[in-house]
Amino acid sequence: MKIKRTLIALCLVLMLAVAILAVSSCSDDDNSDPGFAKHSVTVNSTDECAVSVDKSEAEFAETVTVTLDLKATDKYVARVTYNGNDATKRSDSTYEFLMGNDNVSVAVELKAYEPRLSDGNGFATFSTTNPTTIARNNGRIDLTITLNGSYMTILDWEIRSTNQAVIPGSSVKKSYADLADAGAISAQTETASYSNLITALTISIDTDKAVTGKTFLLIDLRNGNTSSQTASLVVPITVADEIVTAKWQETLVFDVSALPAELKRGKFNVYVTDLDFVAGSDNKEYQNFIEVEADADGHVEIGIEYVPGRRYYVALWVMNDDGSLTCYRLLDTVGAGSSAGGYNQLNKSTLTFISDGVTLEIIVANEVVD
């Protein structure tokens, strides 16, 4: 009987030992489970854009975050790829992708900015009279974006410079939010007379905060009343120490024969103003010709300096016996040219030339300008 109990006890001990070994074996199997295999993640950085990732190797389906440090100021990120596939953009400088079952190489594709001065649908246009070269240390320079919204009392915008070293800052306005201007960039809307309809956006650049160099202004616009009406403009801007201009020499001949005889024998003042003058430019903003006399044929002749592409306002005043001045109307005059390339002309007292060394005769009407 005693022997039987001993055998039973031995059997129980053996069974317990087997159970412990089984549990131990299961535990060892769990600890040695390798999971998914890891694959390497490498990057292809360039001098123009540094690329980094948050992990050098990752498992299948693990998220990899790519961070960019774009150093080029004349290019933008067109694509970020992993083994040729497009990564998902999360912000201007971060992208993500899910790891596959292969080693991955991450690369960035850059493209050069191309000027875009109009949205192509007539909603927003960078005015042709705006300068694209400005001189530093000359206060504020205004640039005009003309707008043709279907109905617009609210305008959203975001304006920033690609080269913050040249023109720092940005201007951001979102619907029903405060305007945020920073650095050298600010903006404000312009409205039609006696109306709250927005017709233009004026962008001001504080040249005292700018340095010499090149940049692009990225201008994103949206009609706050009609969200589908948007525009994205790309405007090249050069900041220089001085704006050096080409200069033409033109001749204006004013025919005053229609004026009364006593006026024709008197003296005349002619004022010529560069309407598109940019502070820091090396040309003359004002050209004044004082107490000029007419010749025997009733012609008053002056020579002016003209910068190609600009508009000049012209006014002729007659000196009266008491020393006062009276302004007389100038008739529109069209010279050589074409509708495609423009004309040498005076239109509503505004002068434009398309060629150098031109003589333009202008008729002075016997009609006083108020």
Image (cartoon, rainbow, N blue to C red):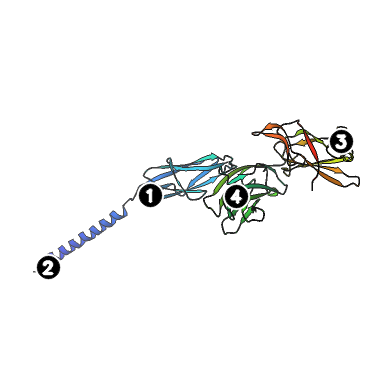
**Dot 1: element:** loop
> What whole-number distance in Å separates the C-alpha atoms at marks 4 and 3?
53 Å
User: Along the polypeptide, which appears first: circle 4 or circle 1?
Assistant: 1
- Along the viewing direction, whichever of 274 and 192 lies nearer the viewer: 192
Q: In which quarter of the view is residue 270 placed?
A: top right
> What whole-number distance in Å separates the C-alpha atoms at marks 1 and 2?
59 Å
> What whole-number distance in Å separates the C-alpha atoms at marks 1 and 3?
89 Å
- Along the viewing direction, whichever of 172 and 86 lies nearer the viewer: 172
User: Along the polypeptide, which appears first: circle 4 or circle 3?
Assistant: 4
Asked if residue 164 can be seen in this view, the reply is no
Determine which of the numbered discs, if any, sits on residue 329 in the image. none
> What whole-number distance in Å separates the C-alpha atoms at marks 4 and 1?
38 Å
Q: Is residue 328 above or below residue 174?
A: above
- What residue type is disc 4 on? Ile
Determine which of the numbered discs, if any, sits on residue 159 in the image. 4
Q: Position of residue 12 (x, y in %)?
A: 17, 64
- The quarter in which the N terminus is drawn is bottom left
Q: Is residue 354 above or below residue 8?
A: above
Determine which of the numbered discs, if any, sits on residue 5 in the image. 2
- What residue type is disc 2 on? Arg
Nearer to us of marks 3 and 2 is: 3
Few, some or many residues within 10 Å of mark 1 (<14, 14–19, 20+): few
**Dot 4: element:** strand
Q: Residue at x 58, y 52 (%)?
A: 157
- What residue type is disc 1 on? Ala
Residue beneath label 3, please?
294
Q: Residue at x 63, y 50 (%)?
A: 201
User: Along the polypeptide, which appears first: circle 3 or circle 2?
Assistant: 2
Residue beneath label 1, please?
61
Query: Residue placed farthest to the right in the image?
Result: 321
Nearer to us of marks 4 and 3 is: 3
**Dot 3: element:** loop
